[in-house]
């Protein structure tokens, strides 16, 4: 019995790598490159959605343009940190179509796959929404700040170890493996 248990544990260790084990250290520039490469692959799922680069959205914010960020992540992820002036997708959907008519509306999530799907589903509804290319990760790698209920924070929630690409100095909060494999519990 003990031999079978050791064999099972060994098998699990082979198929479920421990977070950070054997991970190469990347520079922030390399992390940004990886974020954009991941986003480019995901982009195929929502070709009709207009994207906006994080550096362009940052510049718009700096110039005082009215922006509304729509966070399409779970409440658990949003509790850790959000972009400035962000609202939840539930808040956005509950508002009238004209509520944000004088603002540029930009959806995002960790890397902007979920927000891309959200924006795709809104195409043709009269609600124009851009997708933040590379999501929250591109935002912070391009120099943007994130906030929690107490103000600026250096914590971000990334969906899983694959997306653990925030700049040095950030604390990563990652879903446990069971939630990564079964996200709809």
Image: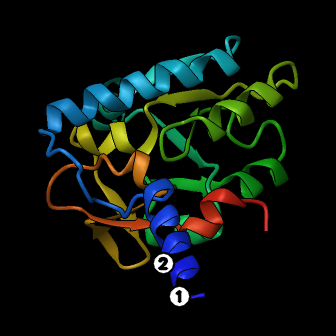
User: Which label was assigned to residue 2?
Assistant: 1
Does residue 53 lie above or below 181 as drawn? Answer: above
Residue 174 rendering spot, x and y as whole percentages = 45, 65
CB contact under 8 Å: marks 1 and 2: yes
Answer yes or no: is residue 68 visible.
Answer: yes
Question: Considering the numbered disc 1 on the image, is that residue within a helix, a strand or a loop?
Answer: helix
Question: Considering the numbered disc 2 on the image, is that residue within a helix, a strand or a loop?
Answer: helix
> 1 or 50, which is in the foreground?
1
Residue 115 rendering spot, x and y as whole percentages = 63, 38
Does residue 137 lie above or below 157 as drawn? Answer: above
Determine which quarter of the picture holds residue 172: bottom left
User: Which label was assigned to residue 132?
Assistant: none
Color style of the picture: rainbow
The residue carrying pointer 2 sits among few (fewer than 14), some (14 to 19) or many (20 or more) residues within 10 Å by Cα, namely: few
State how far apart marks 1 and 2 are (Cα). Answer: 6 Å
Q: Which residue is mark 2?
A: 6
Q: Where does the N terminus fall, quadrant-wise?
A: bottom right
The residue carrying pointer 1 sits among few (fewer than 14), some (14 to 19) or many (20 or more) residues within 10 Å by Cα, namely: few
The residue positioned 29% from the left and 68% from the top of the image is: 153
The residue positioned 48% from the left and 18% from the top of the image is: 40
């Amino acid at each position: 019995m003990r031999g079978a248990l050791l064999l099972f544990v060994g098998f699990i260790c082979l198929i479920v790598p421990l977070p950070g084990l054997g991970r190469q250290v990347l520079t922030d520039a390399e992390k940004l490159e990886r974020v954009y490469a991941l986003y480019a692959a995901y982009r195929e799922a929502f070709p009709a959605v207009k994207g906006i680069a994080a550096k362009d959205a940052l510049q718009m914010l700096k110039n005082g343009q009215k922006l509304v960020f729509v966070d399409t992540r779970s409440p658990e992820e949003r509790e850790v940190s959000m972009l400035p002036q962000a609202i939840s997708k539930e808040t956005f959907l509950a508002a009238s179509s004209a509520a944000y008519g004088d603002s540029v509306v930009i959806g995002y999530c960790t890397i902007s796959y979920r927000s891309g799907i959200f924006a795709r589903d809104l195409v043709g509804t009269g609600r124009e929404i851009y997708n933040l290319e590379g999501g929250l990760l591109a935002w912070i790698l391009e120099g943007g700040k994130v906030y929690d209920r107490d103000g600026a924070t250096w914590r971000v929630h990334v969906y899983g170890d694959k997306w653990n690409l925030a700049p040095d100095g950030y604390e990563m909060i990652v879903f446990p493996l069971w939630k990564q494999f079964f996200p709809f519990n």
